[in-house]
Image: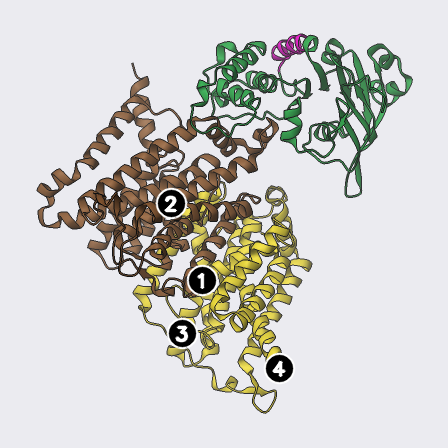
Chain colours: A green, B yellow, C brown
Amino acid sequence: MTASPFILETRGLTKAFGGLVAVNAVSIGFKEREAHAIIGPNGAGKSTFVNLLTGHLPPSGGEVLFKGANIAGLAAHKVTRLGIGRSYQKTNIFPSFSCFENCRLAAQSRLASSMRFFKPARSYRAVSEQAEAALTAAGLAARSGRIAGAMSYGEQRQLEIAMVLATAPDVLVLDEPLAGMGKEESELMVALLKDLARRYTLILIEHDMDAVFAIAQVLSVMVNGTLLESGPLDQIRASKAVQDAYLGDGAEAY
Amino acid sequence: MDSWFFLIQVLNGIQYGLLLFLVASGLTLIFGIMGIINLAHGAFYMLGAYLAYWLAGMTGSLIAAVLLSLPIAALVGYVIEALLVRTLYRRDHLDQVLLTYGLILIFNEAQRILWGNDVHGVAMPTALAWSVKLTETLSYPAYRLLLSAVCAVLAVAMYLVIAKTRFGMWVRAGASNRDMVAALGINVKLLFGVVFAVGAALAGLAGAISTPISSVAPGMGDSVLILCFVVVVIGGVGSVKGAFFGAILIGLADTFGKVFVPDFASFTVYGIMAAVLLWKPKGLFA
Amino acid sequence: MTSHIPKRLAILLLVLLLVLASFPLWGKLVFAAKFTFLLQKVTGIMILALLAMSLDLLVGSAGLVSLGHAAFFGLGGYMLALASPQYDAASLWVALPAALAVTAAASLVVGFLSIRTSGIYFIMVTLAFGQMGYFFFNDSKLAGGSDGATIYVKPTVAAFGVTLIDLDSKLSFFYVVLGALVASYALLRMLLASPFGRVVSAIGVNESRVQGLGFNPMLYKLVAFTIAGTLAGLAGFLAATQYGYVNPAMLGWHQSGHVLVMVILGGMGTLFGPVLGAFILELAHHLFESLTDHWLLPMGAMIIAIVLLLPKGVAGLLIKWTTEKEDGP
């Protein structure tokens, strides 16, 4: 096998639910430190694609190559441990835990094992520092002690990102981080994501085109489970096929 | 082994399985449609048996007693649903387990107050106290055949109601999506009340018609309840079809277990359940 | 899920513990003739409290509602019966480790089979496994079948031929059980604060997210199940020592349901709640029984009333009271 230019790559990735093919032979390469957005109309198979990428669903066919090794079909917790962190479209946190506890637990996954029974979790300094750093990076340092479920929706979305950061991933897979956010909250989040794009490999699923164009360098367009086109921002913007299939609808794009 | 003897065991196993199905189908329907774990379901079986014993003594006819006990069991079920179970629909399983556990205590104590601690038997109706001769030495009691027939007819009727009628459509819709049923403008309260009452009546019927072949005793509801849980788990929670095959499987396993490994008869049933769950953690028909 | 206990509540719990620990002193004065009976009663309740606390690790923290927990309680008791020579004493140094090892192994196997399921399936599967244990001892001739087995001589606690603790003495045994209860509480608190315990508690809140963060929930649930089962075995061993008798009902689902009621009534996920639940339920039982032959009736009604009126149990109520006072001006 020749050395791949990609840190993460799918080859012919396919998922069928019974007769319905949700993701059909999709091959996309993600380069290190690149912000890569996947766009497409509702039902295009973007979320299923993310679930395949992160081990939340086993694929029906094809490969997922991470740093050259096929990780297709690996359980979600193993994928996370390899260094692919994901956030969820629907806020997915521990509402009864404090903001810090949410991140501390995430950071704890970097310990070789959490089968440690005797010392209190808070005495693991490196873990706590990593959690603090993630909270700070996500702009939540001042919210550390708040009960997560009692925070505003926008803050919970930030926490969602902070938790992914706390797992110290190489690749960030963010499933609609702006979903349901107001204008001000969105602007904060876009600024945060732009900042993250400088330091991480970013895979972004998003409907908000302003945000996508502000953050991403590379775009992939999915329609009906297949990859329509993939390439640099300008190329996709100019693409006739993409415009016809998706951007051309106008209403949804802007 | 003697093939006639084997046939008798198969008949016994199927008969027991069909009886279990009557109780288990109610349990699985109540969970599937209403999302309620009803630990007190076995109490309706006990209620049916005690009513049959009591009414048979008063009327002198088991058949009359069975027919009378049916509406009573249904009514008790309906009232309990309306008074208590209704408060549980949006609560978690834990509260349901706890509340219906409290109900069991009340049912068991009520049984003791009304009918005492003694073990009772109910005489076989004379018209049915004959046997089908199989060989010179072996015969099969007609009552057990009739029992199987009644249960089988009810199973078929249940299948037809669920598969073909409007009520069955609601039931099927409810089993897959409770909110959809509500969205269709169906009177959910009434539907749930009726389902609970029907479940109670089926369990009560099973208890009533089994009185001539098994004793009427305190705690009888509990042992049936546990077996029905096994049946439902094996078949897949919420699946009536699963409950049917699970019940037959458990009926046969229990019967053959008693013949071949009498010391560990009850154990065979749980062994089968463990094996099924290892193979399919959500049951055979989930 | 509460890991933080308000200060006032901590003080209240400490006072209650002191009242309990000094029961042999003041109980004699207050109850006089009934004292010996009550001393045994309270010891028995503490054993059930230990059992309820172990179940709380599953129900309150990991979100695993087991309706078969008594099986490990009974198994621990039966192990003492099996380890005891007929008319002689077993050595605690042999019988207790053996009982704990066997219950640990049994809970590992049952846990492995059960944790593959979740929600209502888990409830039903554990119930079925519990009954399997019940019938195992009920149907087999291993230890008296349905009649149960008697342990004629209590185990000895000796070193180099010197008796360290006389378990026959009701007073010493009271303190042995109190010690076991306090030690188990401390152990569970330590576990819940550890990295392991944080993962287990998180599983109870949002299992799929725990997996998304890189933990294998199955593994943590299995270890929690095994720890809880082993502690239940310890409680069963103590119960068998106290009563000198074991029977299959110890493993049955009524016993499991009874303990689950203690956990929920007391307030799950708090560890001290189930202990309170055990005392409230057992004392209510004692009270109702002394008032009427049909004590199950008020008992059932009380359980139903608590489900309807106190969704977070007695501990939830206490936490609310003490926290409000702390936050006040």
How far is mark 2 from mark 4, CA to CA? 50 Å
Label 4: few (<14), some or many (≥20) within 10 Å?
few
Q: Which residue is mark 2?
A: C97
Label number found at residue B2: 4
Give the image location of residue A179, x and y in percent.
65, 21
Same chain for mark 3 and mark 4? The answer is: yes
Between C74 and A199, the residue placed more toward the observer is C74
- Highlighted magenta segment, given as a residue range: A182-196
Amino acid type of the residue tagged 4 in the rendering: Asp
Rendered residue at 20%/32% (across/down): C18
Check disc 3 and report its element: helix, strand or loop: helix
Dot 1 lies on which element? helix
Q: Return the mark for residue B53.
A: 3
Per the image, is B63 magenta?
no
Q: Are marks 3 and 1 on the same chain?
A: yes
- Residue C115 in percent (x, y) is at 54, 43
Residue sitting at the far bottom: B136
Give the Cα separation between the discs numbered 2 and 3.
51 Å
Q: Nearer the viewer, residue B106 or C39?
A: C39
